[in-house]
Amino acid sequence: MFHLLQRCYFQVPSKMAYLQRLLQPRSRPACSFVPLQCILTGLPKSQLFRHSSAVLTKAGFHSSCCNWKKKKPPEPAPRELDLLRYDMKSLKDSPKPALYLSSAGLIPLVSVPLLMAVLETYYPELVFAQIAYGACVLSFFGGIRWGFALPEGSPAKPDWINLANSIVPSLLAWSALLLKDLIDAGITVIIGLGIALHYDLALLPTYPSWFKALRAIVTVVAVCSLIATLCIVNIYPEKHLTPATNKVDD
C-alpha cells in the first residue's frame, strides 16, 4: 500500500501538469494545481508545495496581473478651418512689394462704400467706377493664371484647362460692364471673383503658399466692398455728382 501511494505521489503531479498544459490556451499562464493534488493524494499542502514548485518552475509560471482596462484610442489631431487650409500662416512670408501693392489696390474698392456711407448718399457714378475697377481686378486674376502656366517647370501646364479657365474671369468682367443695371453688374463681378478664387485655390494647380493667402484676403475684401455698395444703393437716396442739364429746344 505504501508503494502504491508513493507511486501516485510522484506520477500524479507530472500527469496533472501535462493535462493542464493541454487544456489551457497557449497565451494564458499555467495555473497551480496544488488543491487538486491534495484531494487526489490526501497529503498535506506543506509536502506538496515543494514538489509542485519544482514542476511549475520547469513549466514556467507567469505572475503578471491581467490588465482589464481598455486602452483609449489616440485622439486625432485637431482639424484646422478651411480658410487656414489656404496657408494663411504664410502671409508673413509674402514679398513686401506684393503685400503693399495688393493692399493699395484695395483702396478704390473700399473707399467708395465708405464715402457713400459717411455722406449717406448713393452716387451712381462712384458705383459704376467701383464696378469697373472690380471688373479690371477680375480680369487681372485671369491673366495671373495664364502667366503662371507659361514658365517651364510650373505645376500648372499650358493646356486647355488652365488657359481656358484663365479667360473665364475676363469674359465675366466684360459681361458685367455691358449690363445697364448697376446691381446686376455688381452681382456679376462678385460671382466672377468667387469663381476665380475657386479655380486658383481648389480646382487648378495652386500658387505658392504666400500668394494663396494674399489672394484669398484680396478677394474677400473686394467681395465685401461690393456687397456693401449694393446695400447702400437700396438704402440711401440717389444723387448725381454733376447735375443733369436740361436741353431746351429753340
Image (cartoon, rainbow, N blue to C red):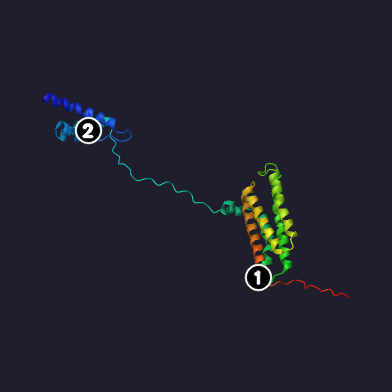
Q: Nearer the viewer, mark 2 or mark 1?
A: 1
Q: Quadrant of residue 44?
A: top left
Residue 123's disc is none
Question: How many C-alpha atoms fall within 10 Å of the one at disc 2: few (<14), some, or many (≥20)?
Answer: some
Residue 122: percent from left, percent from top: 69, 70
Give the answer, above or below, for where 23 lies relative to 132: above
Location of mark 1 (residue): 235
Residue 198: percent from left, percent from top: 63, 52
Q: In screen coordinates, is 11 left or right of 69?
A: left
Q: Residue furthest right?
A: 250
Give the answer, above or below, for where 28 lies relative to 186: above
Residue 20: percent from left, percent from top: 26, 31
Query: Which of the pair 174/69 is nearer the observer?
Result: 174
Residue 53's disc is 2
Kind of residue at badge 2: Ser
Query: Which of the pair 224/148 is nearer the observer?
Result: 224
Kind of residue at badge 1: Ile
Q: Residue furthest top?
A: 3
Q: CA distance from mark 2 to mark 1?
A: 96 Å
Which callout, 2 or 1, points at the residue further toward the start of the chain? 2
Say whether residue 193 is visible.
yes
Q: In screen coordinates, is 162 left or right of 40?
A: right
Query: Which of the pair 226/115 is nearer the observer?
Result: 226
Which quadrant is home to the C terminus?
bottom right
Say whether residue 95 is visible.
no
Q: In screen coordinates, is 30 left or right of 82?
A: left
Q: Quadrant of residue 8?
A: top left
